[in-house]
Image (cartoon, grey):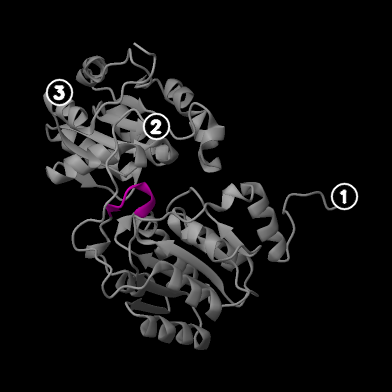
Amino acid sequence: MDGSRRVITSKDFTATLAAHGVDFVTGVPCSFLTGPIARLTEQNRYVPAANEGAALAIAAGAAAAGRRAGVFAQNSGFGNLINPLTSLLMPYDIPVLVFMTLRGWPDPEQDEPQHAVMGTSTHSMLDAMGVRHWTLEDTSTDLDEVLRAATTELAQGEPAFVLVPKGAIGAAKACLPPGLEAENRLARADAMRLLLDALPGAPVVATTGYTARELFALGDADRNFYMQGSMGHAMAFGLGIALARPEAEHVLVIDGDGGALMHLGSMSTIGASAPGNLVHVVLDNGVYESTGAQTTRSARVDFASIGQATGYRTHQLCGTEAELKEAVVRIGQESGPHLLAVRTTPSVDTAPPRATSAVRAGEIHHRFTTALGTSAPWQATGTA
């Protein structure tokens, strides 16, 4: 043996799951699991979930109904998992097998900055909760052997975690799902450029993935907050800004369909809080673009109607440039909050550059705060 890690092919991985009776899999995509997700999707054995906690609850329900259930997630979303893990699975003795990828591990410097804390904490957090876990990290680790050990835990009503480093499982080439061709959709860059031109000077929050990267590629600015990580929370972050700075004419949040679906309940908070300056844009391309173009569930979602139902003052679906221009004019004439759902073209060919490849994450925050004309809230003021 040469000491290099043995890559488990996606075919072998899914076959091993089937051999151990795992016939129900749900989860949230990660680029480390593109191969298994693609195969299980083809076999109609994979249920895409809105977020990691929901995936664990779905799997728990399937387990309670007698199925051997598994979950796919990445450790960046471990926080979403913890509530159902500790307050549903563990006290109720519901066994679920979780495959969680290890971003920011073993060397945080080799990954994006938003993965550093969780990358160095995942193993110890599981230990602190008393959850058994195994890591597919070298040639001596055999998936079948790990699953036999995990089965012992699961048979006792305990959860079991298999931690998956980068490259442990064979990947699949990213390709667009059928039916998501580029016809009658705006290019993401064109939609974003139109919004930026229409709302000059507005602070901009861009969700994680290619949306934040695209904003950076269109032109770096201190007023841009590139929200890499914390998926699903861009709208809540933008709401906090809008409420704290009511004098700002507009606060622009550029969200994605996957991110919006992940924590859709925040839209009800926006509607109830009713900040007149908040412009919430959902760029809906139908896929989780940066993790391999896995399909979201947005094809069955009417974001504009959800905006209406949750109390946004204006809400519009935009499928063309003319419709988006019309919606932006309306924003300038009426008070918000505004919800614009914009159908955009998915892409798997090119990845825009990450902002944090050029600007440190902490610096993005500090210069954004300065651009808002504020100072750090907990700094000493010199008063008694």
Where residue 182 appears, as percent x and y from the top left, is 28, 68
Residue type indicated by callout 3: His
Q: Is residue 166 above or below residue 183?
A: above
Residue 239 visible (yes or no): no
Does the stretch in magenta take in 133? no
Where residue 227 appears, as percent x and y from the top left, is 53, 54
Which residue does the numbered mark 2 point to in the structure image? 166
- In the rendered structure, are the residues bearing label 1 and label 2 in contact, judged by CB atoms less than 8 Å apart? no
Q: Secondary structure at mark 3?
A: loop
For marks 1 and 2, give the CA distance: 52 Å
Q: Is 250 on the left or on the right of 124, as rendered?
A: right
Which residue is pictured at 18% across the width and 45% down the height?
41
Observer-nearest of 338 and 114: 114
Q: Is 269 on the left or on the right of 32, as rendered?
A: right
Which region of the structure is painted magenta? 289-295
Where residue 317 appears, as percent x and y from the top left, is 33, 77
For marks 3 and 1, give the CA distance: 66 Å
Q: Secondary structure at mark 1?
A: loop
- Which class describes the residues within 10 Å of circle 1: few (<14), some (14-19), or many (20+)? few
- Which class describes the residues within 10 Å of circle 3: few (<14), some (14-19), or many (20+)? some
Residue 175 visible (yes or no): yes
Which residue does the numbered mark 3 point to in the structure image? 20
Residue type indicated by callout 2: Lys
Q: Which mark is residue 384?
A: 1
Where residue 376 appears, as percent x and y from the top left, is 73, 54
